[in-house]
Image (cartoon, rainbow, N blue to C red):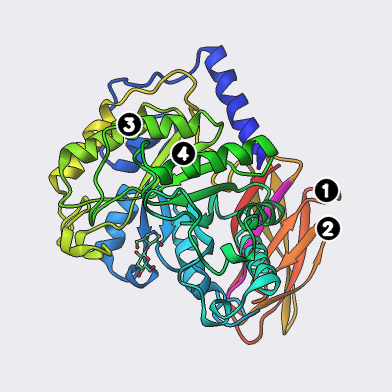
Amino acid sequence: MRLRTALVLATAGLLAAGGTMVFAGSASAASTLGASAAERGGRYFGTAVAASRLGDSAYTTLLNREFNQVTPENEMKIDATEPQRGQFTYGNADRIVQHATSRGMRVRGHTLAWHSQQPGWMQSLSGSTLRQAMLNHVTQVATHFRGQVTWWDVVNEAYADGSSGARRDSNLQRTGNDWIEAAFRAADAADPNAQLCYNDYNIDNWNDAKTQAVYRMVQDFRSRGVPIDCVGLQSHFTGGSNYPSNYRTTLSSFAALGVDVHITELDIRNAPADAYRNVVNDCLAVSRCRGITVWGIRDSDSWRSGESPLLFDGGGNKKAAYNAVLTALNNGTTPPGTPTTPPPAGGSCTAGITPGTVWGDRYNTSVTVSGASTWTVVVAVSAPQRITTTWSGAASVDGSGQVLTMRSNGSGNTFGFTTMTNGNSGARPQIRSCTAG
Ligand code: 9MR
């Protein structure tokens, strides 16, 4: 994780020194949110996605056209991924990840540790049993999505609202104050290449006690070497919460701690164009603000649909706020030092498949990696097929037997594996991602 950050910054520095940087604020006028954000220092413009809507073509048309980042709205939460203790289910999350990564959209994982949406078995645990179960959950889920998730909301909403500046009381908090850093260390061990974020709401106003408390936690983590890379400001300016005039100060203050900042769940009551424009301009003004995710595509997709807080109306039409956001992105300038390229979306190396021997009940596959000498490749087969034997790499196969994460182990750039067809003899493996380093 830290290696990737260093590489991206080094690349930005080289480009700047070489004078080949694409200058921000040039005459380009991209016609979609994602394309325009990408031109503003390799940022993203993303949305929350619900697996249940992927069959709605009006929805996927907007998703595929406008956005280059995706956050599963509910499908990676604890109750979705570990509904029974020790039994992991990834079907809906995998569908969203597949939809996104096959189109070059980056994925924000949401969320590994949270007081809410815990399955019943976890709600009833406490103490060291709960701590161990939480850490196991973090490890299992981060391992499953390794190479596919660019950023993880490792811990979500751990601070109390109001003036106390205290941690939120929860069963996780009662396992000991160090539960947050323990979760970050477990995520770092499971997926060293992911960017690890703390995510919360009501940390937008710099003067709020909650904002200050999260700031002090991040400062402490950075000073002690706890592996944190980023802070997510949910920025739900719905309900009673408003866009604060000091929002840019909040973004730049967190960034000054050496972490990236992300606007992770943006929605604004009645979608006023000026507030949306202000959020975009504030993000563009802070080089470490790497992107904006809105919490849904159409108003009808919103968790607060009654407030019509999004960029598209229920019919999929662009609202005034959409035009304000696109114009702000297109007119935006980026300060010196802004990275010119996004972190690799599980890219920066290429993996090619060569079919091998086929038997009645199974077949072999070889994968050759180019563009990197150390790498992690994620390859998947279709149910009911199962990957059994592997060779020439350090392998980890998930519980379903369908997703193989292979890391280079010094034995060259070609690895292989055997797949049992289990009656599905037509399907063949697909490369999900190739990550260098
Ligand atoms: O949008 C999500 C909604 O569909 C769920 O019912 C709800 C359950 O907690 O979570 C919503 O998403 C929340 C996100 O995970 C964390 N920040 C607040 C979001 C809005 O409640």
33 lies left or right of 226:
left
Compared with 425, 169 (above or below) is above
Name the residue type under label 3.
Asp
Alpha carbon distance from label 3 to label 4: 11 Å
Out of 105 and 369, give the one closest to the viewer: 105
Q: How many marks?
A: 4
In the picture, the quarter occupied by the C terminus is top right
Q: Mark 1 — residue?
A: 412
Residue furthest front in the image = 164
Secondary structure of the residue carrying tag 2 is loop
Alpha carbon distance from label 1 to label 3: 46 Å
Residue 10 at x, y percent in the picture: 62, 25
Name the residue type under label 2.
Ser
User: What is the magenta range?
Assistant: 375-382
Q: Mark 4 — residue?
A: 261
Name the residue type under label 4.
Val
Q: Give the image quarter of residue 13.
A: top right
Q: Give the image quarter of residue 243.
A: top left
The reply to whether discs 1 and 2 touch (Cβ–Cβ < 8 Å) is: yes
Q: Mark 3 — residue?
A: 282
Marked residue nearer the N-terminal end (2 or 3): 3
Q: Which mark is residue 392?
A: 2
Alpha carbon distance from label 1 to label 2: 7 Å
Residue 339 at x, y percent in the picture: 50, 27
Residue at 59 percent across and 27 percent down: it is 9
Q: Nearer the viewer, mark 1 or mark 3?
A: 3
